[in-house]
Amino acid sequence: MKWLSLTTLALGFSVPLAASADWSKTEAEARGQTVFFNAWGGGEAINAYIGWVAQQVKARHGVELRHVKVTDAAEVVKRVQTEVAAGRRTGGSVDLMWINGENFRNLKQGGLLFGPWAEQLPNWGAVDLNKPVRSDFSVPTDGYEAPWGTAQLTFIADRAKTPTPPRSATELLAMAQANPGRLSYPKPPDFHGTTFVKQVLIERAPDRQVLQAPVTPASFQAATAPLWAYLDQLHPLLWRGGRAFPASAAEMHRMLADGELKLSLTFNPNEAANLISTRQLPATAYSFGFSGGTIGNVHFVAIPVNAKAAAGAQVVANFLLSPEAQARKADVSVWGDPTVLDVNRLPANLQAALRKTAPGALAEAVPTLPEPHASWVEALEAEWLRRYGAR
């Protein structure tokens, strides 16, 4: 039985963890390696956090972490696929990547992932197994990716302008009818835009259970018919008549702050608090969810099969799972990304840090709806673009 690092012990963490007997060899191999971490680079708070992680793993483990800022993880997947298809089975350009959903499914199905390794990390023993950390959009992870944060679709409004928020897709449509041109969502395949579409799909689908199985032409047609009928009603009422869409959630936040939109959205229940603290949103901003629940999931990091620094990537992933790194990430003044650890097993000081809230953060209990099977994403995005993308 192996225990967490001395740094973690100093924080008072005392959960015995079963770790790989080879972990010390992994740490030794990692020292001196450079890890190219391909991760979304569109958020200042996220970029700053990854910068802090880079400082820590350099000082503690001698690992150089370089953040390769990407806008779409699918492009990273394509790069890995292209490299391996060209015979580059070692020395790849990607060592660690932030992915989930259909991107993980595509890499796993193609045999393009290193592992399994995730459940051999020393800090895996602190992970909350009641969260969906072993399933990614209904696809078993099988140890090929490690969780590092949780997420749930959350809406943001300004209480000074919208004191009563919509509590369902039906109420959102009514709000759009009462406020034409003041609502929108990011254009798919932007992640937040696709998530909004999936949210409406779940609410409107005649049988939600079919969404947990791989998509078929028949199931797609039956399940999505109410979705398209809803969007056909909604789009003419949106910003610019639904002929254009915001490029990202970040753009929607700015439009909310400027009063151009009445709602924004995020996949981080604490993001509004962070935006208030950095004065990107007014102090009257608040977060809310739908009464019937909103989509939630876990996000992960994975290592490509041809990674040049697989040992270093595992060391970084293990640090990302440490109570210290998870507590810092959950701090709304840093990022506010919720933890994947079992908070009840942590010492009192870290429990308090991880449960700390701030004005603007989601303060209500919103049921979590499971993501559809990963195969639905590409089908939904393709059909959305066919119907609405050329307008």
Image (cartoon, rainbow, N blue to C red):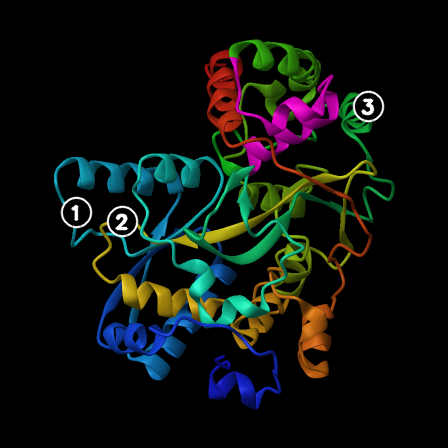
Residue extending farthest left? 87
**Residue visible at 29% across and 36% down in the picture:** 78
Q: Secondary structure at mark 1?
A: loop
Check the image and report above or below for 318 versus 258: below
- Kindly report the distance in space between the C-alpha atoms of the residues bearing marks 1 and 2: 7 Å
Disc 2 designates what residue?
305
Q: Quadrant of residue 85?
A: top left
Q: Position of residue 186 (x, y in %)?
A: 55, 33
Q: Position of residue 53 (x, y in %)?
A: 42, 71
Q: Earlier in the sequence, mark 2 or mark 3?
A: 3
Q: Earlier in the sequence, mark 3 or mark 1?
A: 1
Q: Can residue 165 be spotted in the picture?
A: yes
Q: Nearer the viewer, residue 56 or 41?
A: 56
* Residue 35 - label: none
**Residue visible at 51% across and 42% down in the picture:** 140
Disc 1 designates what residue?
89
**Left or right position of 219 against 312:** right
Q: Secondary structure at mark 3?
A: helix
* Residue 174 - label: 3
The residues colored magenta run 192-216
The amino acid pointed to by label 2 is Val
- Kindly report the distance in space between the C-alpha atoms of the residues bearing marks 3 and 1: 54 Å
Check the image and report above or below for 385 versus 284: above
Q: Position of residue 95 (x, y in %)?
A: 28, 56
Asked if disc 1 and disc 2 are in contact, CB closer than 8 Å, the reply is yes
Residue 254 in the magenta stretch? The answer is no
Q: Secondary structure at mark 2?
A: loop
